[in-house]
Image (tube, helix red, strand yellow):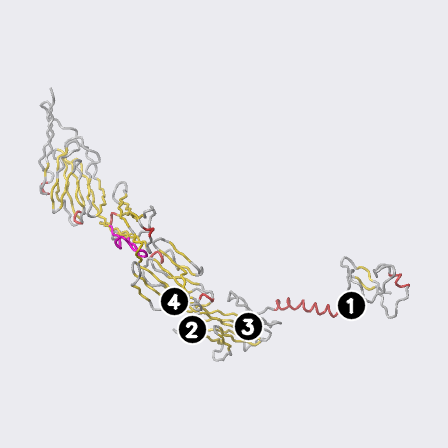
Amino acid sequence: MQENKTYSCTLITNYPSSTMGKYFHAFILICSGSCFIISPLMAGDLRNDVVVAREDTSVILSCFDSPPTSSVLVTWKMMTTREDRWTYLISAQCIAGQTDGSSIEFGSRTFEISADASLIFRATAAAQGHYACVIEQDDKKLQERVVLLALIKLTVTPTPPVTVDSTLRLAAQVSPSSVAAWGTWVSPSGEQLHTEISYGTGSLLSKLPRVTSKDNGVYTCRIHVSGNNDRSVSEHRVNVTVNVKAVFSFTDITHGVPRSLAALFHSLVTLTCPSVLGDYVLVYWEDPDSEIMELIFQFDRWRRSYTNQNKPHIHLTDPASLAAAGNFSFLLRPALKHGGLYLCEVYLDDKAFSQANRLSVLHGYTKSSRTTLDLICVYFERSQVKSVRWSYVQNSTRSLQSRKVVGRITTSVALPVTPETAGQYACTMYLKNGNSVQYTHTVTMANIEPTISPGFALPPTDDSLPSYVSTFSFLVFLIPLIAVAVGVLLWRQGFCVTRRNVKQSLSHHSREGENIYENPDDLRQQTPPQGAVYMDLKPMGETDVYKELDW
């Protein structure tokens, strides 16, 4: 006999929440006049999943990990983030993992159960919250699955196409914020961009300052979702295009109050920038003699790239913390010619902030001659200098005579140093805004000696070097001169020793040879010319020095 099988799927809707679990449902299986129930689903543990959906997109919430093998009642309910109770949405009888796919309108929103009992609806701000899928059989709950629907909103500013040199802002807002365990923006080439995450607000921000044509492409917001058993990753994409025919120009520029600074040669000085959390910074330097402005430093905190073009003596105060947070300042250890105008420009989105630092550098050194010790001060970037003068620290009322030329002032101390002239001398440079810097030099009686010949002394590279000529150096220079003078005197008096290869001018040559040292007896037997002087010399050793013999 042929078996007749009847499958019935009944959709139950619009039951109030107070009657949840008491729905009428029918599952009839007729087989040869007898009824039996297929084995029910095993009751599982409550599982909390997180689904991140982009606003105004379709969402599918799954109910089953695997389709049931018997007839069950599937009920979907929800609880918004503003409520503390569940609200019934829709129910359907599911047989062998299949339903008839019904839908319902609820609060101007449409909810639909698909053939596999998944819940389908459109994600809106009001749809955010918890959704529960309850599986029942014979009024007995077999399983309940709770899903948290989180919303993500992506924004690209300015709206593409983006103009060249503008700042591209990629922002993602996740709600609720606790969903995002970690996240990053990824470039079209797959490179992770520097991303700032605010866990309190659930925002993920990345920027591309000074956009170029190379920044075209699809950018991905990749979020590691917390709450899921497998720590799943949710990815959402936006497309960015660049208009290469349009170039952005900064018109909103804020200028800070210019700063006038004074610093000693090779001392540390801080150059400040505008106090804003900027995206990138540019530093320019103007040589006061040439009035040419050149870019010497640039740093992009989003791309984590920097360039120090021409001045290795300048660097960020704290690249790890200050620059990473967007607060920029620089340390400078200037040489004399590093004075000038330092212009720091910080850019934030479509705004620019400028801060000027004009630096004058003071350097001191000494130059000694036979009669004086010259104390010299030189300075660079003179436009903001009010005056420069030497003073005697031990007695500020003493007037010092100074010689001045452009960028230099010199005072002299007579040698030898006396108790009245020994002490500390100070060269002070005063700026027009009242700032000042001072170079000091101590003159002592013990370490100052005159030199034999005056000469120009180059400025030392280290202010700690002594400015006097030591007695030892003086003697090293003097001893060769004395030796030469004594040698000339002895030569003229005839007492200078003679080497083998030198002939004495007063000797008489023998007829047997030119060498006067070969046979002294022959020389004695001959009648010498009147007024002639003979000397017998014999070797004294390996030094080839000869001594006069007694007759």
The residue sitting at 36% across, 53% down in the picture is 304
Where residue 83 sits in the image (x, y, percent)? Answer: 15, 48
Q: Amino acid at mark 4?
A: Asn
The numbered mark, 1 or 4, whose residue comes first in the sequence reads 4
Q: How far is mark 3 from mark 2, CA to CA?
A: 31 Å
Q: Quadrant of the C terminus?
A: bottom right
The residue carrying mark 1 is: 495
The residue carrying mark 2 is: 385
Q: How far is mark 4 from mark 2, CA to CA?
A: 14 Å
Q: Residue 25 or 316: which is nearer the viewer?
A: 316
Which label lies toward us, 1 or 4?
4
The residue carrying mark 3 is: 444
Q: Amino acid at mark 3?
A: Thr
Where residue 549 sits in the image (x, y, percent)? Answer: 84, 63
Where residue 327 sits in the image (x, y, percent)? Answer: 34, 60
Instruction: Indicate left or right for 317 with 418 as reference.
Output: left
Q: Residue 302 or 73: which is nearer the viewer?
A: 302
Whether the residues at callouts 3 and 2 have beta carbons within 8 Å, the answer is no
The numbered mark, 3 or 1, whose residue comes first in the sequence reads 3
The numbered mark, 3 or 4, whose residue comes first in the sequence reads 4
